[in-house]
């Protein structure tokens, strides 16, 4: 149990140092902003199809496309993946789970 505690303690200390702006070995991934409408058009999907594929509401998608709101978190990561290779991402998202296991 002390190994787990030591690991957690080290992680917390690194997080605190990082939050203070100190140099640490913390790896930070910051997804870039994306043009949601452009990505959707590349896929050839309608708004309702694209929203269903990403597991979001059409209303949310419309807000993103109009620039009223910006995607964040996992949605932004998925959209970045779609911007890089939308065909592969759609293949993954549309394949049955049993194929992925």
Image (cartoon, rainbow, N blue to C red):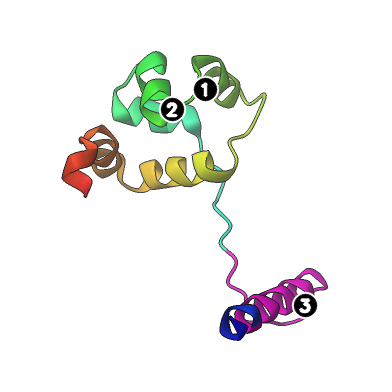
Disc 2 + disc 1, Cβ < 8 Å: no
* Residue positioned 30% across, 42% down in the render: 89
Q: Percent from the top left, x then y, of residue 51?
A: 43, 22
Few, some or many residues within 10 Å of mark 2 (<14, 14–19, 20+): few
Q: Name which quarter of the figure residue 7 lies in.
A: bottom right
Cα separation, mark 3 vs mark 1, equals 37 Å
Main secondary structure found in the magenta portion: helix
Q: Percent from the top left, x then y, of residue 15?
A: 72, 72
Pick the front one: 67 or 13: 13
The residue carrying mark 2 is 55
The residue carrying mark 1 is 61
Magenta-colored span: 6-28
Horizontal arrangement in the rendering, residue 101 relative to residue 29 (left or right) = left
Disc 2 + disc 3, Cβ < 8 Å: no
Horizontal arrangement in the rendering, residue 94 relative to residue 26 (left or right) = left
Instruction: Residue 20: say if magenta.
Output: yes
The residue carrying mark 3 is 17
Instruction: Residue 30: say if magenta.
Output: no
| Location of the N terminus (image quadrant) | bottom right
Q: Residue at the right extreme?
A: 20
Q: Name the front one of labels 3 and 1.
A: 3
């Amino acid at each position: 149990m002390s190994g787990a505690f030591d690991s957690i303690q080290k992680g917390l200390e690194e997080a605190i140092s990082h939050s203070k702006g100190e140099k640490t070995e913390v790896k930070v991934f910051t997804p870039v902003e994306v043009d949601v409408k452009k990505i959707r058009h590349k896929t050839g999907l309608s708004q309702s199809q694209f929203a269903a594929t990403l597991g979001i509401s059409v209303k949310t998608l419309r807000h993103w496309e109009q620039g009223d709101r910006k995607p964040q978190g996992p949605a932004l990561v998925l959209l970045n993946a779609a911007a890089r290779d939308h065909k592969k991402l759609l293949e993954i998202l549309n394949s049955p789970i049993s194929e992925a296991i």
